[in-house]
Image: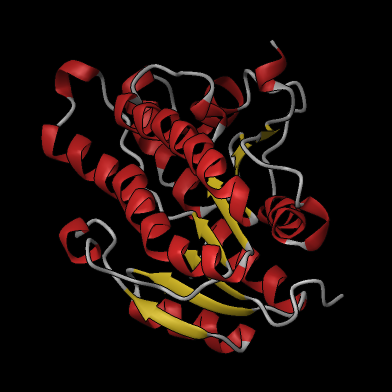
Amino acid sequence: MTELEGRRALVTGGASGIGAAIAHAFADAGAHVIVADLDADAAARTAAEVGGEPWHVDLSDVAALETLRLDADILVNNAGIQRVSPIVDFDPSDFRRILQLMLEAPFLLVRAVMPGMVERGFGRVINLSSVHGIRASAFKSAYVAAKHGLEGLSKVTALEGAPHGVTSNCIDPGYVRTALVERQIADQARTHGIPESEVVEKIMLTEMAIKRMVEPAEVASLATWLAGPHAGMVTGASYTMDGGWSAR
């Protein structure tokens, strides 16, 4: 499979979880992958595995991104963090950091890659949103706000990119089996007042009709199709992969 042969793909949060799965899938499809991550060692390892290149970057430092120009045919906005807390207890600095990393940074990265995409007449922007981009859950005010904003940004990118061969879409998974999700378990247990052993069943999977987590490789498969030549008429869309959560 070489549907992405000759393409340069930038994947943020690419050193682990969903990002690493996408980096591997893109490389298998022939792309040269730039693995962007805050963890320099992990970015270097993943880049070496896929024959790509690492980019050690703190995407929450948005001021450093304002004058950036990047050469990429495919941009995957995947980097993210999570905080679980009631609004009245939510640290305002955490709220700002989540919006900077998960909404402002994607805007600045789209801004950085769009000129080259327009010049070449081809571009794919893939935003890793969430079912929380179209639904809400208590105790996740910053994450839900950022993902809802990302959905809007993706649609505007789609409209502006359409005359130039540039598409923009969101992938909206439910809970994916990653370290980010696993790190939520203690916070969820504390916030909901239940044992950690009950969090997956009683909190994470309660809204999903299919009672299992999404696998990173499943998300990567959809991302690879969206990045490829057969998805040229798919833009401004949000693809749910939530086990039926949003069907309710």
Residue 144 locus on image (x, y percent): 40, 27
Q: Residue at x 36, y 45 (%)?
A: 102
The residue at the point 32 percent across, 26 percent down is 190
Q: Is residue 230 above or below residue 42?
A: above
Relative placement, left or right, of 190 versus 137 is: left
State the image quarter where residue 159 is shown: top right
The percent position of residue 237, horizontal first and vertical second, equals 65, 35
Spot the residue most to the top.
248
Mark yes or no: residue 13 visible: no
Q: Nearer the viewer, residue 27 or 68?
A: 68
Q: Quadrant of residue 209?
A: top right
- Classify 56 as above or below 48: above
* Residue at screen point 67% across, 39% down: 213
Is 106 left, or right, of 244 in this rendering? left
The image position of residue 141, as x and y in percent, is 31, 24
Q: Is residue 71 left or right of residue 7?
A: left
Q: Quadrant of the C terminus?
A: top right
Give the number of marks: 0
Quarter of the image with the N terminus in it:
bottom right
Q: Is residue 66 above or below residue 180?
A: below
Instruction: State the image coordinates of residue 216 (x, y, percent, origin top left).
Output: 66, 54
Decide if residue 137 is in sight here.
Answer: yes
Q: Is residue 169 above or below residue 202?
A: below
Please name whichever residue, 232 or 131, is drawn nearer the observer in this view of the structure. 232
How was this image coloured?
secondary structure
Say which residue appears at 49% left-offset and 44% top-offset: 181
Name the foreground residue: 144 vs 104. 104
